[in-house]
Amino acid sequence: MKFEVLNTSVGEWLKGTGPESDIVMSSRVRLARNLAHYPFVSRASETERSEIEDFLHSHLTKTSVGSRLEYTNLGGLEDLDRQFLVERQLISREHADATGARGVAIDPAEQISLMINEEDHLRIQCIHSGLDLEAVWEQIRGVDEEIEAVVPYAFHQRWGYLTACPTNVGTGIRVSVMLHLPALVITRQIDKVFRSLHKISLAVRGLYGEGSQAFGDFYQISNQITLGRTEGELIAQVADVVPVLIDYERRAREFLLQETEQNVHDQVSRAFGILRTAQTISAEETMQLLSRVRMGVLLGLVDDLHVSDVNKLLVRTQPAHLQKMKGVDLDTKDRNIERARFLRSYFESGSPDDN
Amino acid sequence: MQCQQCDKQAMFHITELEAGEVRELHLCEDHARVYLNQAEADSQQEDSDTEGGPLGVGQTAKELSEIDQLVCDMCGITFFEFRNQGRLGCPNDYVQFENELEPLIANIHGEVEHRGRRPNRQKQKTVGGEVLPESTEELTRVIGMRKDIRNAVEGEDYERAGKLRDEIQKILHKWHAEQSGN
Ligand SMILES: [Zn+2]
Ligand SMILES: [Zn+2]
């Protein structure tokens, strides 16, 4: 069914296309919205949560955007399928792990997802590959306006759009850009760079893996405040700092090439070597090594491999993707073996079972 | 979300105000209990040290404990519950706890006034062609009325329950918020 279809594609955020996609993985905007006539999710009864889900589901299908999306009742899904959607960044981990009535509507291109009964009644998310915040904003604003024409969002003259947590009140907007910054990590400049970001009230977090500790060289920059500024100003706050980070990362990559080419080449080749030959490998190690190889590809140190291949592997080596591909549940030990097997065969035969 | 102290799921989301700083904690049940007991012991300590000196944002311990007892008329959440969970109960909390939330929101955002997009009410007239107000407070009253219906039914006052249902229907209709099949 549908999830099998999703499994053969890579999803929007890892397509590896769009402006600055050598460094910027994806651009995302999320809006938090609530119905005015129900308690927030954490205070709603079972019955109320079901009513909220029914209300939003039925009203969304009346919009042209909603009718294009595929609706999934998350409570009725297997754990594995929910995990699968988390790995594709179509729902949050919290949304997957929660209980009670909740759902998600996803568009076929996997750019838009509407999460129902997450922390707020409705979370609208739009994600594009590469640095593309303006287009993401245009798209999500259209979706939001369409929904608002048929759904009474809780709004207050002074506080703006009302959210379950006061940290989201006002615009309800979270603007995030996911960056791949391996050279800044290798040259040990990453902490310094991020300390400066905190000063301008932007949040940074690492990409979380299976054990939910930050790892790899992937970082997400997002706005922290949501009130007292326009959406445009909040987007600009993130958008303005991204070119600076891109410039730092490019310079660090150049520096590595000029000063320590042999060293870098060696690191990249070893990473590639492990990925091609390992017999068992964890998700964390895979991501770290893929990160090195990705940088190697972009620096021209690896032949016969494209960035899009590496991006594809980043998502398809994650636990739920592996298990969906194999068609059975696997424990951690078996997953590590299956992951290594998948990587070996991928590199041997080019791209097996690919679209 | 995972507990900040162990691998368990975080069930408690605690927002702390400390010396004008907002700190968010995400803890499992066990660690939350440990933390809250500790925090209580600390604040009693502080109480006797400073004799009701400023705690949080320019409020005394006594004022804070009075604030904690505030209850939302619609969803019934207390300010204490909100502080423990870090999550509000319903849209009315922003109206009813406005003064108490203001310093907290000012701390988080550095601002206390929305400047972003606003709903386009020109597109959302009532059935009678009236323009709806910008704020949705009237619609949020329905949350409290549903509670009143439950109470009326419990007290076997079916006439009142019926009246309330009609009233709710009227408000929902005005705001185009009826539950619908497609
Ligand atoms: Zn814990
Ligand atoms: Zn309330």
Image (cartoon, grey):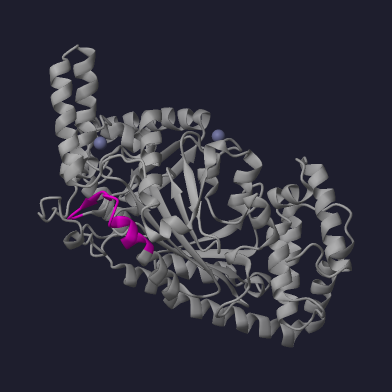
Q: Position of residue A167 (x, y in %)?
A: 35, 52
Judging depth in this view, the residue of A101 and A270 nearest the camera is: A101
Judging depth in this view, the residue of A279 and A38 nearest the camera is: A38
Give the tally of numbered discs. Answer: 0
Asked if the magenta segment contains residue B175, the reply would be no
Report whether A47 appears left or right of B116: right
Residue drawn where x is 25% and y is 46% of the image: B57
Magenta-drawn segment: A143-158
Report whether B107 appears left or right of B9: left
Report whether A300 appears left or right of A172: right
Judging depth in this view, the residue of B90 and B167 nearest the camera is: B167
Residue drawn where x is 16% and y is 14% of the image: B157
Q: Answer yes or no: is residue B2 visible.
A: no
Q: Residue A344: name its quadrant.
A: bottom right
Q: Where is residue A107 in the image (x, y as percent from the top left)?
A: 51, 59
Q: Answer yes or no: is residue B29 visible.
A: yes
Up/down of A1 relative to A228, above or below: above
Q: Residue B180: name its quadrant.
A: top left
Residue lying furthest top: B156
Q: Where on the image, by quarter, is ligand 1?
A: top right
Judging depth in this view, the residue of B167 and A20 nearest the camera is: B167
Up/down of A228 relative to A47, above or below: below
Report whether B100 appears left or right of A261: left
Q: Where is residue A240 in the image (x, y as percent from the top left)?
A: 42, 77
Residue drawn where x is 35% and y is 46% of the image: A165
Asked if the magenta segment contains residue A144, the reply would be yes
- Quadrant into which the C terminus of chain B falls: top left
Q: Where is residue A312 in the image (x, y as percent from the top left)?
A: 70, 65
Up/down of B109 relative to B153, above or below: below
Residue lying furthest bottom: A258
